[in-house]
Image (spheres, grey):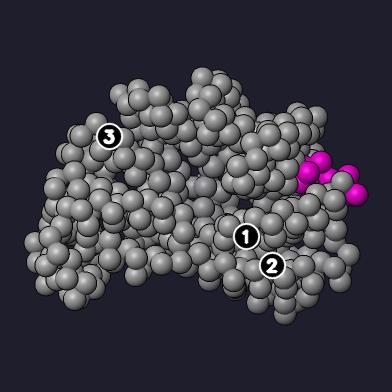
């Protein structure tokens, strides 16, 4: 068990899983349920990291049953927390939040201080992921107060990093950088290399967003070097991906493809199905930028097979939208509509507002390709009302609006502005051509 935990912390997931399996095999000859639960929880942490959520859920339920049999409150709360993590990964955010809150109630009642902090972080994460960033920040702040009181510097470093990501999501880049630097300083003070690598990677993304590609490359290479030093294979693959994305933005497409393929090789070694799927999709997106659309679709569709198997709805929707976008460039409207139809089934299931908004923006473009300018403008009005605080596609919308205004008659614009606002279902029906009633 201890060897498994150590290997897991170093990112050596295959070896960690092997040791946890050895432990579980030995424990079959004993009646020691506590050690069995410990080994199960250790193994499922590995399964989280390699994207095998189905098996992780099976192990959690097995561990939870044992914990409930012995009425071990600590392990019950840990299992519920881990089950929440799996549900979040699968896109079941409300279910995940309920599990986290049940676990938090136990942790507070039983004074499980360290576990309480972990759960607070998870609740903060899910609030930020679903667009409720102010509430997410409050959970992070509560966790920060707890870890300062408990003197948990490693946890403090992690929370500051997460809080930095929350501010990054709101495009508050200066505040984000400040928190990342605080996190990094603590990680260096306690000699925690894994966190240093993680924070430096986030800093790289933040500098990239600022347009400072020189600084971004510097900190991303630092992160990669740290992960190589500690043998963190997942961190190395993530580093290749981050630098690859940067190369793509600089239009160095061949360099980006080489890095993505290096990451793909590692992720295949780790058996990381989600990582494999996302890497294949990243390769496809770069090929699309090179206008090699046929190969791009092939890679993204292969990536989707892995992503669908893992069951993360948000990842699936993002890649369906990427395919729809490419088929739009090819003027293959049947395939564009087909992928929008598949994505429409996921719109009501996910909470990520940026991805939802992108679906509707692509829907407008689909209608414009068919010269359905009136319908497109109706949906644009819907997006402006529904997603007014989401700035990610603001510039895109302004450009579309200008084009639509040039294509519509004045009386149509008046009619649109005076008409009733559409519901999400009505908008989806309009995009897919299943409704003609605009009144």
Position of residue 311 in the picture relative to residue 36 (left or right): left
Q: Is residue 192 magenta?
A: yes
The nearer-to-camera label among 3 and 2 is 3
Residue position marked by numbered label 2 in the rendering:
140
Query: Which image quadrant is residue 92 in?
Result: bottom left
Residue extending furthest toward the right: 189
Label 2 CA crowd tier, 10 Å (few <14, some 14–19, many 20+): many
Residue extending furthest toward the bottom: 109
Label 3 CA crowd tier, 10 Å (few <14, some 14–19, many 20+): some
Find numbered disc 2 in the image and state the secondary structure of the residue it sits on. Answer: helix
Give the magenta range: 189-196
Residue position marked by numbered label 3 in the rendering:
329
Mark 3 or mark 1: name the one nearer the start of the chain.
1
Residue 246, visible in the rendered structure: yes
Q: Are marks 1 and 2 in contact (CB under 8 Å)?
A: no
Tell me: residue 58, above or below residue 107.
Answer: above
Position of residue 343 in the picture relative to residue 94 (left or right): left
Find numbered disc 3 in the image and state the secondary structure of the residue it sits on. Answer: helix
């Amino acid at each position: 068990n201890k060897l498994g935990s150590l290997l897991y912390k170093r990112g050596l997931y295959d070896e960690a899983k092997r040791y946890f399996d050895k432990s579980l095999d030995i424990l079959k000859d004993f009646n020691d349920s506590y050690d069995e639960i410990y080994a199960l929880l250790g193994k499922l942490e590995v399964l989280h990291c390699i994207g095998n959520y189905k098996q992780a859920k099976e192990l959690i339920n097995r561990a939870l049953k044992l914990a409930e049999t012995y009425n071990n409150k600590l392990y019950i709360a840990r299992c519920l927390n881990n089950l929440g993590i799996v549900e979040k990964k699968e896109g079941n955010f409300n279910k995940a939040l309920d599990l986290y809150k049940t676990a938090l109630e136990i942790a507070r009642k039983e004074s499980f201080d360290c576990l309480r902090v972990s759960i607070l972080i998870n609740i903060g994460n899910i609030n930020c992921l679903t667009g409720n960033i102010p509430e997410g920040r409050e959970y992070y702040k509560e966790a920060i107060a707890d870890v300062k009181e408990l003197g948990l510097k490693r946890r403090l470093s992690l929370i500051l990093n997460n809080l930095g990501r929350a501010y990054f999501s709101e495009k508050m880049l200066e505040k984000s950088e400040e928190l990342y630097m605080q996190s990094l300083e603590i990680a260096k003070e306690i000699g925690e290399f894994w966190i240093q690598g993680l924070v430096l990677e986030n800093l790289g993304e933040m500098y990239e967003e600022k347009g400072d590609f020189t600084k971004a490359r510097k900190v991303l290479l630092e992160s990669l070097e740290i992960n190589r030093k500690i043998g963190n294979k997942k961190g190395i693959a993530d580093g290749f991906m981050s630098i690859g994305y940067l190369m793509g933005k600089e239009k160095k497409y061949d360099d980006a493809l080489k890095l993505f393929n290096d990451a793909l090789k590692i992720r295949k070694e780790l058996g990381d199905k989600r990582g494999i799927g996302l890497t294949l999709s990243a390769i496809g997106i770069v090929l699309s930028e090179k206008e090699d659309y046929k190969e791009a679709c092939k890679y993204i569709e292969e990536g989707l097979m892995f992503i669908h198997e893992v069951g993360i709805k948000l990842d699936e929707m993002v890649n369906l939208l990427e395919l729809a976008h490419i088929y739009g460039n090819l003027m293959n409207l049947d395939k564009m509509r087909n992928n929008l139809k598949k994505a429409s089934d996921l719109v009501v299931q996910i909470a990520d507002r940026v991805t939802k908004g992108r679906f509707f923006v692509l829907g407008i473009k689909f209608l414009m390709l068919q010269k359905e300018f009136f319908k497109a403008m109706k949906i644009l009005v819907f997006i402006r009302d529904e997603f007014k605080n989401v700035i990610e596609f603001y510039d895109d919308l302004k450009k579309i609006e200008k084009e639509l205004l040039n294509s519509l008659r004045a009386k149509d614009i008046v009619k649109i502005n005076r008409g009733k606002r559409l519901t999400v279902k009505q908008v989806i029906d309009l995009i897919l051509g299943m409704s003609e009633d605009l009144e």
